[in-house]
Image (cartoon, rainbow, N blue to C red):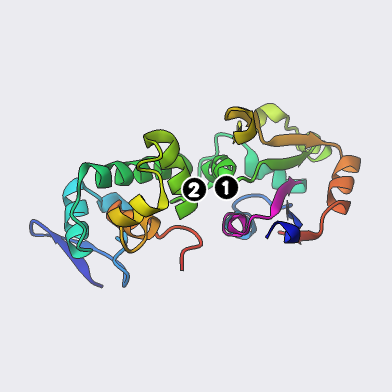
Amino acid sequence: MAAYDVNGTSVEHDEEGYITNLGDWTKELADVIAAAEEVDMTDEHWAVVNFLRDYYEEYQIAPAVRVLIKSIKKSMGPEVGNNKYMYELFPYGPAKQACKIAGLPKPTGCV
Amino acid sequence: MSETVKKFLYVNRKAPYGTIYAQEALEVVLIGAAFDQDVSLAFLDDGVFQLTKGQDTKEIGLKNFSATYRALGDYEVTKLYVEKESLEERGLTLDDLQNIEYEDEDDDYAEKPSIRLVTRAEMAEVMADQDVVLSF
């Protein structure tokens, strides 16, 4: 199985790049995954990633993209919580790509 | 798309962890929620155990997905019918169930309870009123 390398420690991931053991996640790992995804992490990226981790902690699921955007809009305002901006942050899909960086499983219903 | 909205009812009658039905039903509901239909859930027989609070799955090595019911409101699934007789037959009351709420966008995002306690007779009416009933 393929793995990310975080300062010499290897963290296993599946064929799509989602980590196998959710407990393996660290901020350093997030930077490594983001680099592999060619995403340059800014404060806004972190805000979305942290939101996803909090959502998963509370509800045990990664939210669908429209639920994510709606919730971000509510917590962070419409200038962040809109489709266009979220896709600028995560070009391969805010739920799919941000969940990968956040160390969560692929969102339910995501193919 | 509004002219094609149908009323979907997902009927949950099994305990949460002995079989995969409860978790699969919840997953289908979450995926199906993307289609903007009128979705309700029904909980009867052992299905009422799915909503109990304080579930702990550590000893059986399964994921505790009970928290996910509280996310249903985010998916605009806001009608969870629970059968009164099924609760009573198992020595349960509404107090044994999780507090599940949704935010009503048309009422300044007021938090409202999603669980609706209905009698067996009322449950039959809820079922009769649907276009599609999916039983798990």
**In magenta stretch: residue B32:** yes
Q: Nearer the viewer, residue B34 or B31?
A: B34
Percent position (x, y) of residue B76? 61, 45
> Which residue extends farthest right?
B121
- Label 2: which secondary element: helix
Q: Amino acid at mark 2?
A: Val
Q: Quadrant of the C terminus of chain B?
A: bottom right
Looking at the image, can residue B29 be seen?
Answer: yes
Q: Residues within 10 Å of mark 2 (few under 14, many from 20)?
A: some
| Residue at which label 1 appears | B75
Q: Chain of mark 2?
A: A
Q: Residue at 77%, 47% (x, y): give it.
A: B45
Residue stretch in magenta? B29-43
B41 vs A78: above or below:
below
Q: Quadrant of the N terminus of chain B?
A: bottom right
Q: Mark 2–mark 1 contact, CB under 8 Å?
A: yes
Please indicate whether residue B42 sits to the left or right of residue B128 in the image.
left
Q: For residue A67, which numbered disc appears in the image?
A: 2
Please indicate whether residue B46 sits to the left or right of residue B63 in the image.
right
Percent position (x, y) of residue B7? 76, 54
Q: Residue at 84%, 47% (x, y): give it.
A: B126
Percent position (x, y) of residue B4? 74, 61
> Which residue extends farthest left?
A8
**In magenta stretch: residue B26:** no
Q: Residue at 64%, 33% (x, y): give it.
A: B106
Image quadrant assignment for residue B91: top right
Image quadrant assignment for residue B135: bottom right
